[in-house]
Amino acid sequence: MRIILLLLAIVAVAITSTAQDYQDYADGYEQDNLYQDYAAKQQEKVDGGGGNGLGKAIGAFGISYFIGAKVHSNRVTKKMKTKHLKDQKALYSQYYNDVYKLEEQKAEQQAVIEQYQAALA
């Protein structure tokens, strides 16, 4: 008895599953041609048209190169300005120290000259 009920249930499921019409669930959905568009595009690439992948790659490389160069040159410029500012500050300090020493030497020499002139007179 159980076997008959089991077979009857299997037959009922098989009948209902094969008899379904999926258009009942479409609700205005119409068949699209997405795959056909994709296949046409791929065929167009194979034929030599529409494949501007190399141009895009070169353009992307150029843009990334320009941006990278801009960033790195700004870093180097900032670093070099800091270095040159330090060098310039050291140079000016050395200049002022040298001028001060020369003025001291000049004053000492002037004092020695005055002593010689006083001794001669």
Image (cartoon, rainbow, N blue to C red):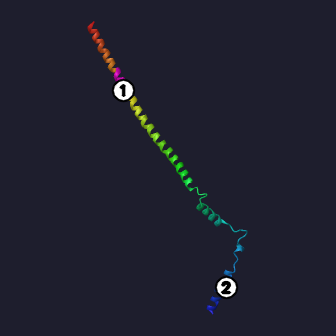
* Alpha carbon distance from label 1 to label 2: 109 Å
Residue depth check, mark 1 versus mark 2: number of the one nearer the observer: 2
Residue 70 locus on image (x, y percent): 51, 44
Residue at position x 41%, y 32% in the image: 89
Residue at position x 52%, y 51% in the image: 61
Secondary structure that dominates the magenta span = helix
Residue at position x 35%, y 25% in the image: 98
- Residue neighbourhood size for the residue with mark 1, other residues' Cα within 10 Å, grouped as few (<14), some (14–19), many (≥20): few
Which residue is denoted by mark 2 in the rendering?
Answer: 12
| Quarter the N terminus occupies | bottom right
Range drawn in magenta: 94-103
Q: Is residue 72 above or below residue 19?
A: above
Between residues 38 and 104, which one lies in front from this camera angle? 38
Q: Quadrant of residue 20?
A: bottom right
Residue 80 locus on image (x, y percent): 44, 38
Q: Is residue 68 above or below residue 108?
A: below
Whichever of callouts 1 and 2 sits on the residue coming sooner in the sequence is 2
Which residue is denoted by mark 1 in the rendering?
Answer: 97
Disc 2 residue type?
Answer: Ala
Q: Is residue 52 above or below residue 103?
A: below
- Residue neighbourhood size for the residue with mark 2, other residues' Cα within 10 Å, grouped as few (<14), some (14–19), many (≥20): few
Residue 37 image label: none
Residue at the outermost right position: 28
